[in-house]
Image (cartoon, rainbow, N blue to C red):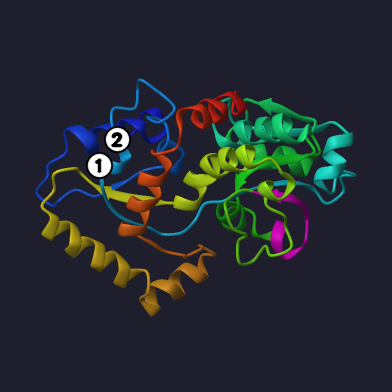
Amino acid sequence: MPGGAGLAATNWGAKIAPKDGSVIIATYHVLLLDPLFGDPAAEYFPPDLEWVGSIAKQQSVCMTWFKSKIKTVEDAERHDVTVSSTGTSGATYTIPMVLNSILHTKFKVIAGYQTAEARLAVERGEVDGMCGMSWSTLKAASPDWVSQHKMNLLVQTGNSRQEDLPQVPLLSDFVQDASDKKVLSLISAPDDMGRPFFMPPGTDKTLVQIVRRAFDETVMDPEFLADAKKHMLEIAPISGEQLHTMLVDAYQTPSQLVERAKALMK
């Protein structure tokens, strides 16, 4: 269902979709806090949706090409760093803006690329790198970047380090102020929720539980996992119950911290 980078489908799933157990919506993690941030186009309230589960986290990284002189966050604080982006609303725009606001880095976002072109711009040397790109997507889309060590990984988002990036610092590692840490935790919450699925609110709870358990069994199935590995797709599942708890916690964030998060992402 095209429209609004998943917004149309999510609104439909929350307001119009049949509640008979026949509908499961794959939404985008970046949409999960839009109602909290006051987006009038978001006609859904995530804690009320019936969450099935998530395939994996979708934490982002900031990277530069291996030939770049920018190899650490400290380098990015001292030198301008050009990064490619598809626009001015997604993570490849908001994450560098957050880093600039909190860490006083010097990311310069060059927007207007298509997704594949944004990666090609890095390879061609048009920009120094990308910031806010999903690590799991990057591994699947540009596996040679990983296998041939073509990246300097500066920082990763999220509230805990990814299993295969134990040496890459979290954004929160650079922040001492307790309030800023809470704001970063809120900004990172959608990344921790990853690739989520939900059923319409009001769906019979028994049906929701059947689908949740089916999801849980699928993401542990050996054949499914083998197929995912073959395609370099990351599987690190989150249950529907866990997703619901994470969203309830996020939507209980004090309003002053929500406003601070909104300001940082502009």
| Amino acid carrying mark 1 in the image | Asp
> Residue placed at 16% from the left, 38% from the top?
17
Q: Is residue 188 visible?
A: yes
Q: Secondary structure at mark 2?
A: loop
Q: Tell which of 42 and 151 is nearer to you.
A: 42
Q: Quadrant of residue 44?
A: top left
Query: Horizontally, is 5 left or right of 200 in the view?
Result: right
In which quadrant will I find the N terminus?
Answer: top left
Q: Are marks 1 and 2 in contact (CB under 8 Å)?
A: yes
Q: Is residue 3 above or below residue 13?
A: above
> Residue placed at 35% from the left, 76% from the top?
221
Residue 31: x %, y % from top left: 41, 36
Give the residue at mark 2.
Answer: 45
Residue count near mark 2 (Cα–Cα under 10 Å), binned few <14, some 14–19, many ≥20: some
* Residue sticking out furthest to the bottom: 222
* Residue 232 part of the magenta-drawn span: no
In which quadrant will I find the C terminus?
Answer: top right
> Residue placed at 68% from the left, 40% from the top?
177
Q: Is residue 194 visible?
A: no
| Amino acid carrying mark 2 in the image | Phe
Span shown in magenta: 145-156
Query: Horizontally, is 95 left or right of 36 in the view?
Result: right
Q: Secondary structure at mark 1?
A: helix
- The tag on residue 48 is 1
Residue 197: x %, y % from top left: 32, 51
